[in-house]
Image (spheres, helix red, strand yellow):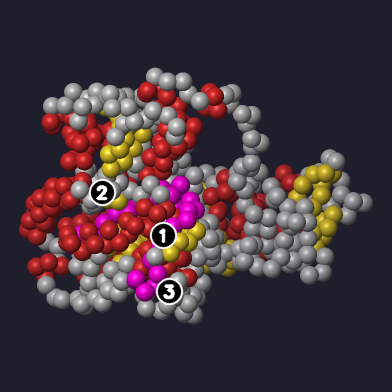
């Protein structure tokens, strides 16, 4: 063993390799992305790494490998588990032969997600064991334990770090390469009675799962992960139960103070009943501090009822802890002070600091999505239109002054929402905006649905040749894989024409005149139409020379600012100016300026 300073996600990826990982598949999503990227970076060629088209494909690929006895890992964020839930629920019944970890990174806050859903609750719903690390070191250590448990009980295992564990850095004890495990898969052994799911098989599997989870709960109670720390005062009859990053906040809050009895729940499902009973013994009152659902609170309440224990369990359900958002050192300290009847530290009671300046997220300077949205907006002026968005950088098209995203639900949903609106409002021009990566992940079926059901809509694909929001990962349209292979690009045009979209036009959104004319022409047609706005992500290309404003021509109308909202255009002393450190020379503003005061020097894009 030796020490390295690692991010939590990097530690998980390194631990998987050390445990004899054979295959890893996933779909990028903050805060999970770096796990798979770490494996790819440290791959010596002995294992297979894949960015799948979506989480469902990733889970099913890993399941096939696990059927062969391979050790596999699937990576995703919490909303990605929704996409993978269909195979997950059945796989819980079928089981696996090789160890299989489903890494689901939760995002309390939320910081970069649509929801605050809690994967601990999903673990209970799917009846799968769950590991919930509280630190980078614990995340590293749990990987090997999860693989071993998975192989012992022939079940997938969920590993659920949250953002503050995924993106934390810590000095971590890691294995030397000489200590790495090597897993040699046996291969697939045909057995229809095991691998083919039928109602009778499922009925028997359900019975076995319930019995297994009782046994598993006892084993996890004795694992040493679900720990009880005695109170510093022997007569104290209060306790605090917690997990994950919140437990670390509790330790910080109690440093140098009289501490009650503590219970760290590292395996929320099956709930470690034996360890919980040891914790509850002799207590009058317990405070549960957790993110996000009251999983521990409900578990302890159930155990008290089951065993007739007169212990008051407090937490989210009783209003003692907030029921949304992530916990912080400050909020946990205040919770503990109220529970213990002590004075909160001065720093916690101090006045709320002044609010920080509002800094809303915006599309990058030079982002081609800005040009795409603006072209559609210009083309549809005065016409009744609706603009359905999707998940990606382009969700930021909802911000002023563009104001071009009317709906956003989940990945791929905009294509079908557009169809629903069109059925009720047939006089509305219905647009669905979707990125290239999202198109492959979950929008193709929406396009098929539109063609089959004779919808009248315009599908707009914003193709910037990458998965930009999560860190520029490859996808089927980029022509490369995470294994470093150069492969044939999957053509979006060919896919659309193949499913029956008759009008498919491709245009550079940074050529504003051509883009506007394309939108006008295509939107006038009936049926399902598609426009592909193709221009690379501004972050991936070498920027051109910044735009220049001719002070003699500029009338300070600020149309460039009011129309585009580009961070590369600012005001200085009340006058419009170019922020040279941000401007990429895309030339869009020069095409918007009504008096021709903005130009792009030689070497710019226009």
Q: Estimate the x, y position of residue 184 in percent, counting from the top left.
A: 26, 77
> Mark 2 highlights which residue?
224
Is residue 162 found inside the magenta-colored segment of the image? Answer: yes
- Asked if disc 1 and disc 3 are in contact, CB closer than 8 Å, the reply is no
Q: The residue tagged with tag 3: helix, strand or loop?
A: loop
* 46 lies left or right of 361: left
- Identify the mark nearer the N-term, 1 or 2: 1
Confirm whether the magenta stretch covers residue 223. no
- On residue 43, which mark appears? 3
In front of the other: label 1 or label 3?
1
Question: Which residue occupies the foreground of this view, 525 or 226?
Answer: 226
Looking at the picture, tell me which residue is in the foreground, 61 or 488. Answer: 61
> Which mark, residue 173?
1
The x and y percentages for residue 41 are 47, 70
Q: Circle 1 — which element?
A: strand
Q: Which residues are magenta?
A: 154-180
Asked which secondary structure carries label 2, the reply is: loop
**Nearer to me, 596 or 327:** 327
In this orientation, does residue 582 appear?
yes
């Amino acid at each position: 063993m030796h020490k390295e300073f690692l991010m939590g996600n990097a530690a998980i990826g390194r631990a998987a390799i050390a445990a004899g990982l054979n295959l890893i598949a996933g779909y990028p999503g903050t805060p999970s992305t770096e796990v798979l990227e770490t494996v790819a970076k440290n791959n010596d060629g002995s294992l297979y790494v894949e960015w799948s088209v979506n989480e469902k494909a990733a889970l099913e690929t890993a399941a096939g490998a696990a059927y062969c006895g391979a050790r596999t890992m699937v990576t995703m964020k919490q909303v990605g588990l929704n996409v993978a839930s269909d195979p997950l629920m059945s796989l819980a019944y079928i089981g696996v032969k090789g160890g299989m970890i489903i890494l689901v990174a939760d995002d309390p806050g939320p910081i970069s997600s649509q929801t605050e859903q809690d994967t601990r609750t999903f673990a209970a719903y799917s009846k799968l064991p769950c590991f919930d690390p509280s630190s980078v070191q614990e995340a590293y250590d749990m990987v090997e334990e999860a693989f071993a448990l998975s192989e012992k009980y022939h079940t997938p295992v969920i590993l659920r770090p949250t953002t503050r564990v995924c993106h934390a850095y810590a000095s971590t004890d890691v294995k030397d390469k000489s200590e790495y495990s090597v897993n040699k898969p046996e291969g697939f052994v045909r057995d229809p009675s095991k691998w083919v799911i039928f109602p009778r098989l499922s009925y028997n599997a359900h019975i076995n799962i319930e019995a297994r989870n009782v046994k598993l709960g006892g084993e996890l109670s004795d694992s040493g992960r679900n720990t009880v720390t005695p109170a510093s005062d022997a007569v104290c009859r209060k306790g605090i139960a917690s997990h994950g990053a919140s437990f670390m906040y509790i330790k910080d809050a109690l440093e140098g103070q009289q501490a009650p009895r503590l219970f760290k729940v590292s395996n929320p499902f099956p709930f470690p009943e034996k360890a919980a009973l040891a914790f509850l013994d002799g207590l009058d009152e317990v405070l549960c501090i957790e993110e996000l659902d009251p999983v521990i609170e409900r578990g302890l309440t159930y155990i008290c009822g089951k065993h007739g224990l007169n212990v008051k369990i407090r937490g989210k359900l009783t209003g003692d802890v907030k029921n949304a958002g992530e916990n912080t050192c400050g909020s946990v300290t205040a919770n503990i002070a109220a529970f213990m009847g002590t004075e909160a530290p001065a720093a916690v009671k101090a006045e709320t600091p002044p609010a920080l300046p509002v800094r809303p997220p915006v599309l990058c300077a030079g982002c081609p999505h800005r040009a795409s949205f603006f072209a559609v907006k210009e083309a549809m002026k005065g016409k009744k239109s609706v603009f359905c968005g999707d998940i990606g950088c382009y969700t930021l098209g909802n911000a002023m002054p563009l104001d071009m995203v009317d709906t956003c639900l989940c990945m791929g949903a905009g294509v079908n929402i557009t169809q629903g609106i069109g059925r009720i409002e047939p006089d509305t021009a219905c647009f669905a905006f979707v990125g290239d990566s999202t198109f492959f992940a979950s929008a193709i079926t929406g396009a098929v649905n539109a063609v089959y059901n004779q919808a009248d809509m315009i599908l707009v694909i914003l193709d910037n040749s990458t998965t930009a929001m999560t860190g520029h990962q490859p996808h089927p349209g980029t022509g490369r894989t995470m294994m470093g292979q150069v492969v044939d690009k999957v053509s979006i045009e060919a896919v659309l024409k193949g499913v029956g979209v008759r009008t498919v036009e491709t245009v550079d959104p940074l050529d504003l005149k051509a883009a506007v004319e394309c939108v006008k022409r295509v939107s006038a047609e009936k049926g399902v139409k598609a426009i592909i706005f193709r221009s690379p992500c501004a972050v991936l290309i070498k920027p051109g020379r910044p735009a220049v404003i001719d002070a003699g021509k500029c009338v300070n109308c600020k149309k460039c600012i009011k129309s585009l909202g580009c961070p590369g255009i600012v005001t200085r002393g009340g006058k419009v100016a170019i922020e040279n450190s941000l401007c990429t020379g895309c030339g869009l503003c020069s095409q918007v300026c009504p008096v021709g005061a903005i130009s792009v020097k030689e070497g710019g894009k226009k």
